[in-house]
Amino acid sequence: MFLYICRRIVYTVPIALAVAVVCFSLVHLAPGDPLSAVIPADAPAEVVERIVQAYGMDRPLPVQFFSWLGRAIQGDLGVSVATGRPVAGEISRALGSTFTLALAAALLGFLFGTLFGTVAAFLQGRWSDRLVTGIALFGVSVPHYWLGLLLVIIFSVQLDWLPSLGGGSGSFGERLPYLILPAVTMSFIPMGIVTRTVRSTVSELLGSEFVTSLRARGLSTVSIAKHVAKNAAPSVLAVMGLQFGYLLGGSILVETVFSWPGTGYLLNGAIFQRDIPLLQGIILTLSMFFVALNLLVDVLQTLFDPRIRRS
Amino acid sequence: MQNVKSPSPTPPKSADGGKLATQSRGYWATVWRSLRRDPLSIVCATVLVGLVLIAVFAPLLAPHSPAESTMVNRLLPIGSAGYILGTDELGRDMLTRLMYGGRMSLVMGILPVVIAFVIGTSLGLMAGFFGGWVNTVVMRTTDVFFAFPAVLLAIAISGALGPGLGNSMLALTLVFIPPIARVAESVTTRVRMLDFVDAARASGAHSVTIIRIHVVNNVMGTVFIYATSLVSVCMILAAGLSFLGLGVKPPTPEWGLMLNTLRQSIYVQPWVSVLPGLMIFITSLCFNLLSDGLRGAMDLKR
């Protein structure tokens, strides 16, 4: 077990390194000179040269990459072109908001997804099952940014119950109303997918022989459900982990709709101000979280279900 | 598994290349017969065909020109005289713009998946069939792309490349190649182990022939179903990129972009502003349902 976990961690290193390479090359993917935002168009050649040297852009690419990576590991992601402030500071300020939103959406989505999925699996084929499958389908088909807009229209414009913009300020209680609409909006995607997963996993288990034998021995539905839950946990957990990662990394659209002060909103600004260091820093941070999350899910899954340990 | 009831199950594909063509026609006919009996799939297919036709023939069908704007008629409500679905923030007819908007939105939702399907399947076939270092190179590269959440990757690439139709299509294509390649690889690896491939190889068939005739036919179905399920994701993501301002530029009518510009008007005409999003939702829902129906119909083999 310990050996497996070690191997899994070691396997993550090249992936993380490759992710860093992709993030680094984003700068060079961008059309034009990456420094064009810093250098005035009429700057004399020697000034340009000095700026290029100051940014280290005159060195060969691999050297640039490793010095960039070395600084990134130490928490130095460069300076934002737009604001002149350190990128790391900007990101860490926004990260908390994104985390809060993702966590709230995940809690809602996982709770209702598990509930709906279990109910649908136990009531297979009835109208309630159809209803739940319909909800799941809605969750995966609806453009969530549009759903957010709909919720704003209903609950902010028409009913005037909840605020529609920003993250609020002050105590948690004062900020909570701002969280509700974006969190509900974002929870629909994981809810749909978790419902589908739970439904198919649980209904497969309910048809398996060991459940039949438990039934034959006269166990109550509750204790059968316990057995089923234990067996369904690893694969459902894996899906949930992945979904949480998607919520963290994919919140840009919802954050833009609600002007939620998180990394997605920051990223949106960085794209349109051509603030490449900020863009690079956000992508790197979020994808590293995703890589770490994948590792965590894999390790947890093996702890839950030793059968998964392969080769 | 419930679909086994079907009266004419597909015959397993034989190693005989000559016979294969007629048999795969039989297979598709069976799929079509089973799909035809599924009312939901038929409804969805009809809606999608209708949307495509409306988009193609928009110049003939639309009551106005998509660029014609009359400032006096700004933000009219749904049901106004001459403007059945109201007007947008520049006084342009919503019905017309929704019809024209389907062109860009459908192309941006479908084309990246089609291109990714061709490239991803080729990569997956190569990786699965040749194994060894080819497999290692292709699959480890896809692993890197899997280390990014899909939405973030699409936005990162098109954000770095800058706004524009071509750039956002490129970003979407790049996002969908790795998952398709991974599915194609795993199916190919399984098919490669089957006896009829060994038989073909023993009778001296060239690798290219084996892939072209025996492997491709057996891999395509699964990968195709998977790719159709990605179209709805691509629709939502493509419109999302336009919604952020990374896709087409105004005044081109496109559902995502229309939703973005109408966002400012939710206090004036809330129900007009949600119409473009409704179109995205209907399209993606239909693609999802059709893909589910297709999966059921094509699952006859098992």
Image (cartoon, coloured by chain):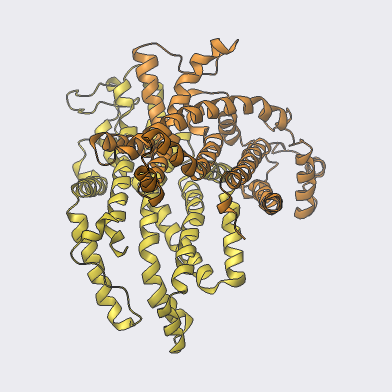
Chain colours: A orange, B yellow
Residue drawn at 35 percent across, 18 percent down: A154
Q: Nearer the viewer, residue B62 or A259?
A: A259
Is residue A169 among the parts visible in the rendering?
A: no
Residue A49 percent location from the top left of the image: 80, 45
Residue A34, above or below B122: above
- In which quadrant is the C terminus of chain A drawn? bottom right
Residue A211 percent location from the top left of the image: 39, 46
Q: Nearer the viewer, residue B135 or A203?
A: A203
Is residue A80 among the parts visible in the rendering?
A: yes
Residue A257 percent location from the top left of the image: 46, 26
Q: Is A159 displayed left or right of B138 in the figure?
A: left
Residue drawn at 61 percent across, 45 percent down: A303
Residue drawn at 57 percent across, 25 percent down: A100
Q: Is B60 displayed left or right of A277 in the figure?
A: left
Which residue lies most toward the front here? A217
Residue B267 percent location from the top left of the image: 36, 16
Q: Is A306 displayed left or right of B106 in the figure?
A: right
Q: How many marks?
A: 0
Q: Nearer the viewer, residue A200 or B72?
A: A200
